[in-house]
Image (cartoon, rainbow, N blue to C red):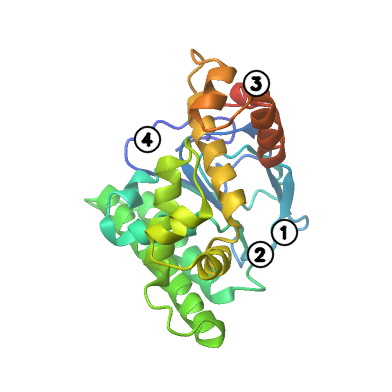
C-alpha cells in the first residue's frame, strides 16, 4: 500500500491502483502523469472542510458523493484534504482502449470532469459503489484480486457508458430525432481528428468522413463532446504535445510543429490557455 507521501509515484504491477483514505495525501503539489485517475469523496464521509483539488487552472471543491476525473497529461494538485476522507483509483487507459466494446466511448468518457452527486446521483452512486468494491477486493485475501479488480473496473465503465448512451438517446428524442448510431459516428470523428491533428483538418472533411452535413455534425459534435470543432482539434494537438513533452530530448519548438501548430507562438498561447502554464513549466511537472 502506498503511503500519503509517495502514493503518486506508482509502478503498476497491474493496470489498476487503489488509494484508500488513509493513504491519500492531505496535499500534493502540481504534477501530471500518463495514467488516468478518479478521486472520490464517499457519500457517507463526514467532513468539516470540503476537499479541494485543482486541474489546470480550475479548482474543484468536492461534496460528499462527488467524483473528479483526471485524464492523462492533465496538470493537477491536491490543494486541501484536511479531513483525509478522499479515496482514489488510478488506471491505464489501455485497460479500456484494448476492448473494442469501449472504443466508441473512450473519447466521450474523457469529456467528463466533475461528477456531482447533487446533479447526477445515479451515475455518482454507480461509480462510487464500484470503487468501494475494488477497495474491498484490495483488502481481502482472494485468489485472483487483480482479475476481480479488472472485472469491477470494466463493470464500472459499462455503467458509465450506458449512462451516456441513455442520456444522449433521451436528448436526441427531444431535439435530434432519427440520429441512430450517434455515439459511434462521433467517436469515429474524434478518432479521425486525433489521428490527423498534426495536419490541416477541416470541419467539412470530418463531417463528410462520418456522413453528416456540416451543420448537423457541428451541432451534434458539440452536444456529445462539449467542445466545438476548433476547440477539440486544438485540444488534441495539446494532448499530442503533452506526450512529447515527457521526452526531454525533444525541443519545445520541434514539439510544437510535430503536434500540428504552425508557429511556436501559437503553440505557447494555446498551451497556456488549455493547461495554465508554459510548455517548459509543464515539462517540469512530469511525474515519472
Residues under numbered marks 3 and 4 in contact, where contact means CB atoms less than 8 Å apart: no
Residues under numbered marks 1 and 4 in contact, where contact means CB atoms less than 8 Å apart: no
Residues under numbered marks 1 and 2 in contact, where contact means CB atoms less than 8 Å apart: yes
Disc 4 element: loop
Q: Residue at x 50, y 16 (%)?
A: 250
Residues under numbered marks 3 and 1 in contact, where contact means CB atoms less than 8 Å apart: no
Q: CA distance from mark 1 to mark 2?
A: 8 Å
Return the mark for residue 64: 2
Disc 1 element: loop
**Label 1 or label 4, whichever comes before in sequence order:** 4
Q: CA distance from mark 3 to mark 1?
A: 38 Å
Q: Residue furthest left?
A: 143
**Label 3 or label 4, whichever comes before in sequence order:** 4
The vertical placement of 255 against 213, above or below, is: above
**Residue 161 locus on image (x, y percent):** 41, 67
Q: CA distance from mark 3 to mark 4?
A: 27 Å
Which residue is tagged 3? 280
Residues under numbered marks 2 and 4 in contact, where contact means CB atoms less than 8 Å apart: no
How many labels sit on residues?
4
Q: CA distance from mark 2 to mark 4?
A: 29 Å
Q: Few, some or many C-alpha atoms within 10 Å of disc 1 (few <14, some 14-19, many ≥20)?
A: some
**Residue 190 locus on image (x, y percent):** 44, 53
**Label 3 or label 1, whichever comes before in sequence order:** 1
Disc 2 element: loop
**Residue 219 locus on image (x, y percent):** 57, 68
Q: Is residue 121 visible?
A: yes
Residue 238, by quadrant, is top right
Foreground mark, 3 or 1? 3
Which residue is tagged 4? 12
Foreground mark, 1 or 4? 4
Which residue is tagged 1? 47
Amino acid at each position: 500500500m502506498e503511503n500519503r507521501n509517495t502514493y503518486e509515484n506508482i509502478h503498476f504491477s497491474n493496470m489498476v491502483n487503489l488509494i484508500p483514505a488513509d493513504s491519500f495525501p492531505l496535499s500534493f503539489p502540481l504534477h501530471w502523469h500518463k495514467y488516468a485517475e478518479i478521486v472520490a469523496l464517499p457519500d457517507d464521509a463526514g467532513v468539516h472542510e470540503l476537499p479541494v483539488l485543482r486541474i489546470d487552472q480550475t479548482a474543484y471543491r468536492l461534496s460528499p458523493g462527488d467524483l473528479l476525473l483526471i485524464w492523462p497529461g492533465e496538470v493537477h494538485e491536491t490543494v486541501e484534504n484536511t479531513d483525509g476522507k478522499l479515496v482514489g483509483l488510478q488506471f491505464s487507459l489501455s485497460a479500456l482502449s484494448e476492448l473494442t466494446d469501449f472504443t466508441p466511448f473512450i473519447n466521450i468518457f474523457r469529456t467528463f470532469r466533475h461528477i456531482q452527486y447533487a446533479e447526477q446521483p445515479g451515475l455518482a452512486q454507480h461509480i462510487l459503489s464500484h470503487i468501494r468494491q475494488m477497495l474491498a477486493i484490495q483488502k481481502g485475501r482472494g485468489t485472483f484480486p487483480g482479475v476481480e479488480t479488472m472485472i469491477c473496473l470494466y463493470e464500472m465503465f459499462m455503467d458509465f457508458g450506458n449512462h451516456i448512451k441513455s442520456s444522449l438517446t433521451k436528448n436526441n428524442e427531444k431535439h435530434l430525432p432519427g440520429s441512430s448510431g450517434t455515439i459511434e459516428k462521433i467517436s469515429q470523428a474524434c478518432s479521425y481528428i486525433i489521428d490527423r491533428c498534426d495536419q490541416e483538418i477541416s470541419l467539412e472533411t470530418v463531417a463528410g468522413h462520418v456522413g453528416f452535413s456540416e451543420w448537423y455534425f457541428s451541432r451534434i459534435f458539440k452536444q456529445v463532446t462539449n467542445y466545438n470543432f476548433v476547440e477539440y482539434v486544438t485540444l488534441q494537438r495539446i494532448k499530442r504535445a503533452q506526450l512529447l513533452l515527457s521526452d526531454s530530448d525533444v525541443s519545445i519548438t520541434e514539439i510544437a510543429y510535430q503536434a500540428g501548430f504552425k508557429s511556436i507562438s501559437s503553440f505557447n498561447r494555446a498551451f497556456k490557455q488549455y493547461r495554465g502554464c508554459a510548455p517548459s513549466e509543464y515539462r517540469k511537472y512530469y511525474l515519472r
